[in-house]
Amino acid sequence: MTRIKPSILELLEKEESIFLKMDKYTEVKEIITTDPLFKATSWAGYRFLAQMPPELEPIIAELVFKTIQKQTLQSLTLNQTLHPLLPFSIKIKFFPTDKNTIGATLTRYKEDYIATKFYERVPVMTLYLNETDEVIWANQQFYRKAAFEPTQLISENARDFLKINPKILQHDALAIKEPHLRTEYKLLKGDGGFLHVILTATRQYDDEGRFICTVVVLRDITEMKLTQIELEYQKLSIDEAAIVAATDAKGDIIYVNNKFCKISKYSREELIGQNHRLLKSGYHEPSFFVEMWKTIASGKVWRGEVCNKAKDGSLYWVYTTIIPFLDEKGKPYRYQSIRFEITKRKELEDEIKHYTEHLEEVVEERTQELKFKSDLLFEMNEELLSQNERLETKNKYIQQSINYAQRIQDAILPKEAHLPAFVKDYFLLYQPKDIVSGDFYWWYQDAETQRFVWVIADCTGHGVPGAFMSMIGMTLLDEIVKTKNIFAPAEILNQMRVEIGRALQQDITQNRDGMDMSVVCFEGKTQKIHFAGARNPILLIQQGRSYWLKGDKMSIGGRLVRNEPFQEQTFDWLEDTQIYAFSDGYADQFGGEDLRKFLSANFRSLLLSQAHLPMSEQKAAIQAAHKAWKAGQDQIDDILVMGLRV
C-alpha cells in the first residue's frame, strides 16, 4: 500500500517547532522530528513550497534564493491574519548550511492575544512587531494612511519604513520600547510619500512572562508641521509688541524674550531655569497666586494685573495673560504668558485712589493739586489727540509716497507693447501683496544679435523693502545686458550675484537681502532657447511634452551665499513653444479646507491643464483658481506668473 505523505502544516499542528534541510529548489532532504510517519517517508520529489498556500510561494522562494546566494540568515513571519489560508501563524528562519543546501526552522506562532477587533476601531495607526521588529499585523487605519498593501508588509522590518528625525534630540522609542517615550519619526509610505508621526512602542508578555509582541502606536502629525511657519510669524509679532515668557508644568522658566529681560533687568541666563518667584514683589497676598495656579492648572486662561520686582529692586506692573498648553490627557505641560507694562497707569491709579480715600479730610488742601493733576491729564489727552492727528497726517503722507513709488515702479517695468513680434500670444499675472511689489519682470530685445532676454524675479520681502530691491535688480540688469552685452543666462546670474553683493556691501555688513530669478534667452540666429535659474524653475511645453526645468539651488545674495557658477540648459526653439516663468507667491498661498499651501506640484498641474487654451483664457483660469483656493484668506506674498507662446 502506498503511504500518503503528510504535509509540513500537519506536522506543525502536532509539534510546536521542526527543523528541515532542503536544496535551492526547496526539495526537502531531511526533517528532524519525533513523528514516525515523517521518519518513514521518502523525501524524493518532496518540495517545501508545495506545502504552502500558492500566494506565499514566490515570497518564500525569494528568501531561499537570498539565503543561498548571500550566505546570510533570512527570517519571515507568515501571519494568519494577513493570510487566512494558513491554519496558524508560522515563523521561519532560513540559514545556509553549505553552498547548495540550507536549513530551516519552522515554529508555530501563537497569536490568540491579538485583539484585532479592538485595534481596528481605534483612530490611530497600530502595528504588531515580533522580537526582530518585523511586522506581523497592522490595522486598517495604517493601510489607509500609509498606503501599504498587506503583502508589502510581510517580513518587512519596521526600521525600513520608520526613520527617526535626527534634527530633534530625543530617545529612540522603537529601540527602548517603554510606553512613556514619545518619539518623532518619518513614516515612508508605500506610494513613495511620507508622514510625520509620533511613535510609542510597548512590549507585551503572556502570563508566564514570555515575549508576545511589540505594540506600536503611530499618530499622524503631518498637518501640525505645516502650521509651524505661521506660528513662527505670530511669535515674532508678539515678541516685538509684548513681554513674553514660558514655563514648564512646574513653573520653571524655559523661555523669555528681550522685552522680558529689559523690564526685569535680569539676563536670559539668569532667568532660564528659575521660578517666577524670583520676581516676587511681596505686594500680593499668597491667596492671589494660589487662585492663579488653581485656574491655569485646570486648563483655563488667567488674566490679571501683577506687581513684580526687578533685579535692582524697583517695582513694575504688568497686565498678564497666562495660557496653559494641554497634553492629550488634558493636563498642562507648558504655560505661556503675555504681559504689557502698565506701571504708569497703576501709579496714576494709586495716586487717584489715595486722594479719593482721604478726600473729606484734605479737600481744601488738595483741591489745587487735584486741579493741577486734572489739568495735566487734560494736557496729556490734548497731546495724545495732537499726536494722533500728526500720526494720521504722516500716515497720509506715507500712503501718498507709497502710491508715488508704485507709479515709479510701474514706469520702470517694461511695457507689454514692447514684446518682440515672435511672441504669438502671452499673459501676465502681476498681483502685489501690497501697493508695491518685491516681484518684478524685465525683458530686452537686441535687434542686431537677434537675442531676446526675459527675466522673472522674486526679491527678499514684499512691499516697500521688496520694491527697493526690485529697482536695484532692474538697474543691474540694464547694466549687465544692455551695457555689457551679456546675454547668456548663467553669466547674467553670475554677474547679478557679484553686483548685488557689491551694491549692498554684503562682504562687510550683515545685510543678507537678495533675490531668486529665472533668466531665459531666445536666440534667433541659432533657433535655441537658453535657461538658467537661481532657485526659480520654469515650465517648457513643446510638441505636446512638458519639461519642468529647475534652477540651481542657490539665490542671488541672500542668507546662504555660494560661489559656484550657475548652470545653463539649452533647448531647440520649436514652433508653438510655450514657456511659463513665475515667483513662488502663487504656490505658497495658504487656503483650501485644510488651510495649507497650494504647492508647486498643484501649480504645475494647473498650468498644464490650461495650456491648450488661448493665453488670455489661461490667465483667467489661473486667477479664478487662486481666488477659489484662497477663499477669503489674506494674500501672503507677491504673485507673478507670465506665459509666452513663441
Image (cartoon, rainbow, N blue to C red):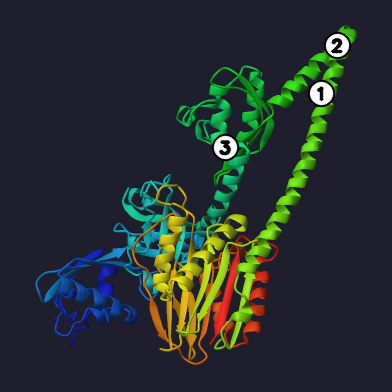
Q: Secondary structure beneath disc 2?
A: helix
Q: Is residue 557 above or below residue 249?
A: below
Q: Cα distance, mark 2 to mark 1?
A: 15 Å
Q: Quadrant of the N terminus?
A: bottom left
Which mark sits nearer the N-terminus, 2 or 1? 2
Q: Position of residue 106 (x, y in %)?
A: 24, 67
| Residue of label 1 | 376
- Front position in the image: 25 or 229: 229
Which marked residue is nearer to the observer: mark 1 or mark 3?
A: 1
Q: Position of residue 258 (x, y in %)?
A: 54, 35
| Residue of label 3 | 335
Q: Is residue 86 above or below residue 162?
A: below
Place residue 466 in its image quadrant.
bottom right
Q: Position of residue 479 (x, y in %)?
A: 48, 68
Write the residue at 68% across / 56% down.
Answer: 402
Q: Residues within 10 Å of mark 1 (few under 14, many from 20)?
A: few
Write the residue at 77% across / 22% down.
Answer: 349
| Residue of label 2 | 366
Which marked residue is nearer to the observer: mark 2 or mark 1?
A: 1
Which mark sits nearer the N-terminus, 1 or 3? 3
